[in-house]
Amino acid sequence: MKFTATVLAPLAVFFCLGGCQSAKPSKTPPGPTPVTLAPDALLPSPRLIVGRIIAVDSRQRTAVVEVAGDAPPAAVADGTELIGRTPALQETARLRASRFLRGRTLGTKIVAGQPSPGDEVVWLAP
């Protein structure tokens, strides 16, 4: 028994002290790994959906847009350029957001084109 205690005591000290050793930290943390895309990879569109046209007044050249819940605040700011398009992605009008924003209803001025109710309204994100 005395022999076992004599052999195990130095081993216990060796393992306890060996566990206290730590690796030296690197001077600079590793940065994000750059992502390389395949040449034929699909990229997200810079056009973000703002909402849909719900009413058009051709005489006053205005359109009312029902704003989507996830529309960015910059897209509905006064003076922002918007694009109206059909479900087939054909551009129908150029719009300019006005100060009129109540809840999810945005008033816009028709700058060019002939939008129709149901047209999708998108914003070209910077």
Image (cartoon, rainbow, N blue to C red):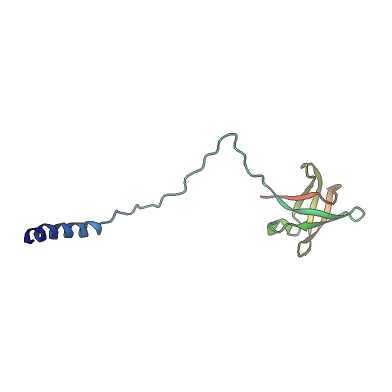
Residue pictured at 67% horizontal, 46% vertical: 46
Which residue occupies the extreme top position in the image? 39
For residue 30, above or below residue 41: below
Residue pictured at 78% horizontal, 53% vertical: 52
Residue pictured at 55% horizontal, 38% vertical: 37
Quadrant including the N terminus: bottom left
Depth order, front residue of 46/80? 46
Residue 119 placement (x, y as % from top left): 81, 49
Left or right of 125? Residue 101 is right
Which residue occupies the extreme left position in the image? 2
Which residue occupies the extreme front position in the image? 1
For residue 111, above or below residue 73: above
Depth order, front residue of 39/17? 17
Residue 87 placement (x, y as % from top left): 78, 44
For residue 42, above or below residue 96: above
Left or right of 68? Residue 10 is left
Report the label total.
0
Left or right of 35? Residue 89 is right
Left or right of 112? Residue 75 is left
Residue 122 placement (x, y as % from top left): 74, 50
Which residue occupies the extreme right position in the image? 59
Residue pictured at 13% horizontal, 60% vertical: 9
